[in-house]
Amino acid sequence: MAARWSVAAEPMAKVKICGLNDPAGFDAAVAAGADWLGFVFFPASPRAILPAQAAALSARAPGPQAGGPLRAGLFVDPDAAMIAATLAEVKLDILQIYAPLARAAALAASFGLPFWHPTGVSGRDDLPRDAGSAAALLIETKAPKQATRPGGNGAMFDWRLLRGWTAPAPWLLAGGLTPDNVAEAIAVTGAAGVDVSSGVEAAPGRKDPARIRAFIAAAKAA
């Protein structure tokens, strides 16, 4: 499956830049070697993008069939009609779905696409023991109760919670990552992939090309 990867076979961490919504950020992520380009289809996010806008950005770089990065679409409690309308305008390789695991799996299966399942963590009891049919898990900071979105809040959790955890599927680390701490995060957790959004922004929803380049360089060198 295109969205899976072999941890043992990868000498460097893989990187997803999420919440891309302008040409400068998109082009910087592609040029710096991002493995996944993420679009947020959730109106409450400052990084939200319309499907047509995502399609225009995506057209700026080769797709995975031509050696380019995979495209991931983030959805929060979507219904099938919303995903269908999005896919009618922009080609996605991965669905990142914030919904109960079984529902996320059913939605992804109905479109024949792999999905990533996010899990918010504040303690060891939150760490997933089952990934179902998810191609990968996204381990991030549990959103505070007053949050308007389940991820992308720029908050870290205690990475030491992951020590001794046996992951049931490939996984990516997210939550509060920046160019300054991503190398340490990888060293502490052993993450084979990292996902960043607010940590490479100049302001909420506005990507900083220099921070994108610095983040990817630091993650790849870790």
Image (cartoon, rainbow, N blue to C red):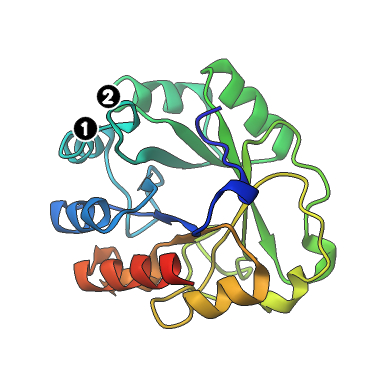
Name the residue at 35% across, 54% down: 19
| Secondary-structure class at tag 2 | loop
Residue 203 appears in the picture as rendered: no
- C-alpha span from label 1 to label 2: 6 Å
Compared with residue 128, is residue 116 higher up or lower down, i.e. above or below?
above
The image quarter in which residue 202 lies: bottom left
Q: How many marks?
A: 2
Name the residue at 56% across, 40% down: 77
Q: Amino acid at mark 1?
A: Ala
Name the residue at 58% across, 57% down: 192
Q: Amino acid at mark 2?
A: Glu
Compare residues 168 and 156 and report the one nearer the observer.
168
Residue 78, percent across and down?
52, 34
Q: Is residue 220 left or right of residue 174?
A: left
- Residue annotated with mark 2: 89
Task: Using the image, tell me which numbered label, if any, was put on residue 52.
Answer: 1
Residue 173, percent across and down?
58, 62
- Disc 1 or 2, which lies upstream in sequence? 1
Q: Is residue 110 left or right of residue 30?
A: right
- Quarter of the image with the N terminus in it: top right
